[in-house]
């Protein structure tokens, strides 16, 4: 866990969002559905990008679900490849995306 950078978004001492960067990969980004559309996710991603850039990283990658694909695209992430994989007995589609910093 030393190579990871974790963020927690709080409103009134309540956790409403999380995000982390492991090496150059964005992971575990989540915003409570009751708090979406308020800029929390954009703020989390922006802080992860700022941290990555300060660490000397030239690009970051992430795996997106179909529901988050448009969100990341608006933030400047480009599709690298679409993959299908088994997740707990179900086939899921994920999108590997990257962004130059």
Image (cartoon, helix red, strand yellow):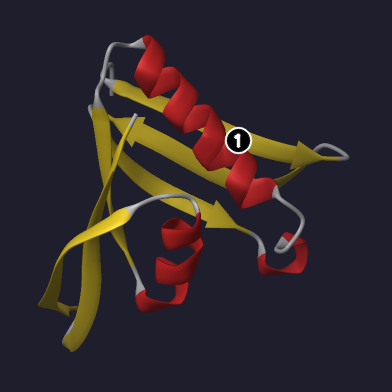
Q: Residue at x 41, y 36 (%)?
A: 20
- Which residue is painted at 60% across and 47% down in the image? 42
Corner quadrant of residue 7: top right
**Quadrant where the image shows the C terminus:** top left
Residue 6 visible within the image: no
Which image quarter holds the N terminus? Answer: top left
Q: Residue furthest right?
A: 12
Please indicate, yes or no, whether residue 15 appears anywhere in the rendered image.
Answer: yes
Q: Does residue 41 appear to the left or right of 67 in the view shown?
A: right
Which class describes the residues within 10 Å of circle 1: few (<14), some (14-19), or many (20+)?
Answer: some
Give the mark count: 1
Q: For residue 100, which quarter of the picture?
A: top left
Please give the name of the residue rendered at 66% of the width and 61% of the height, measured from the top-left corner. 32
Relative to 93, is 6 above or below?
Answer: above
Label 1 SS = strand
Q: Position of residue 41 (x, y in %)?
A: 60, 50
Residue beneath the point at 26% across and 20% down: 57
Q: Answer with left or right where residue 80 lies relative to residue 56.
A: left
Asked whether 34 or 61 is in front, the reply is: 61
Q: Disc 1 designates what residue?
A: 8
């Amino acid at each position: 866990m030393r190579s990871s950078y974790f963020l927690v978004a709080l409103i009134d001492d309540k956790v409403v969002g999380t995000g982390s960067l492991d090496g150059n990969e964005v992971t575990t980004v989540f915003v409570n559905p009751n708090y979406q559309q308020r800029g929390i996710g954009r703020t989390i991603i922006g802080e992860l990008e700022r941290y990555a850039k300060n660490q000397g990283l030239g690009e970051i990658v992430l795996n997106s679900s179909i529901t988050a694909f448009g969100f990341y695209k608006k933030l400047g992430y480009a599709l690298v490849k679409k993959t299908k994989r088994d997740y707990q007995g179900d086939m899921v589609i994920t999108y590997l995306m990257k962004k130059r910093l």
